[in-house]
């Protein structure tokens, strides 16, 4: 009979004798600016194949971003950003988000997002353009809806 012994260490996990990080370093950048750079406990991002949940020690990955909400938790508090387009890379407890658009909820103009949504909805109801134009309009609609979701959450 084989004896198996498990050792649980509560202060930190160890892999190959090295301590694993207890936090992730999250960087969110756009072509125009650095939106965020801080240590966080967890990240949830809208990846191409669905939502990505990332904790310290996550396997390296690269994924395309979809339009949606990027959430991150730090000190028991969950914060959110609107992200659209670009990529996310996870490596060695660093999460790098290179997004076409990234906005904090307080940066979102809800009235402008509402007007954009209404305008695109009208365009889509009587569509006569190309498939490529349709996809661009659909992406604009998706962005305006996420902006409205975050703007409403930050004020409520």
Image: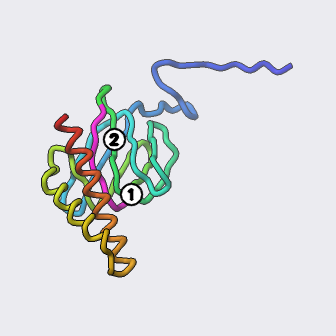
Report the residue at 34% width, 66% height from top.
Answer: 138
Q: Is residue 151 magenta?
A: no
Q: Position of residue 55 (x, y in %)?
A: 44, 37
Task: Give the side of residue 103 with respect to residue 75, left or right.
Answer: left
Report the residue at 39% width, 36% height from top.
Answer: 42
Q: How is the image coloured?
A: rainbow
Task: Give the side of residue 148 with respect to residue 23, left or right.
Answer: left
Report the residue at 26% width, 59% height from top.
Answer: 101
Which numbered tag is attached to residue 52?
none
Task: Answer with the quarter of the image where residue 63 lies.
Answer: bottom left
Label 1 vs 2, first from the N-terminus: 1
Count of picture labels: 2
Q: Position of residue 15 (x, y in %)?
A: 55, 33
> Image height check: is 80 above or below 130?
above
Task: Answer with the quarter of the image where residue 141 lies.
Answer: bottom left
Which residue was labeled with disc 1? 66
* Residue closer to the observer: 57 or 82: 82
Q: Position of residue 26 (x, y in %)?
A: 32, 44
Which residue was labeled with disc 2? 71
Crowding near pointer 2: few (<14 within 10 Å), some, many (20+)?
some
Q: Quadrant of the N terminus?
A: top right
> Image height check: is 77 above or below 51?
above
Q: Position of residue 139 (x, y in %)?
A: 33, 64
Residue range corresponding to the magenta coloring: 78-86
Q: Quadrant of the C terminus?
A: top left
């Amino acid at each position: 009979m084989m004896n198996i012994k498990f050792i649980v260490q509560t202060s930190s996990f160890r892999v190959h004798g090295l301590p694993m990080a207890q936090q992730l370093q999250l960087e969110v950048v756009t072509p125009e600016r650095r939106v965020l750079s801080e240590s966080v406990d967890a990240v949830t991002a809208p990846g191409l194949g669905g939502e990505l949940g990332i904790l310290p020690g996550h396997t390296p990955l690269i994924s395309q971003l979809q339009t949606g909400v990027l959430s991150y938790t730090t000190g028991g508090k969950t914060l959110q950003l609107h992200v659209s387009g670009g990529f996310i890379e996870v490596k060695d407890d660093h999460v790098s988000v290179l997004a076409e658009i990234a906005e904090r909820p307080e940066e979102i103009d809800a009235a402008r997002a509402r007007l954009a949504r209404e305008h695109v909805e009208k365009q889509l109801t009587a569509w006569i353009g190309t498939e490529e134009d349709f996809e661009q309009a659909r992406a604009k609609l998706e962005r305006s809806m996420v902006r409205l979701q975050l703007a409403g959450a930050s004020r409520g």
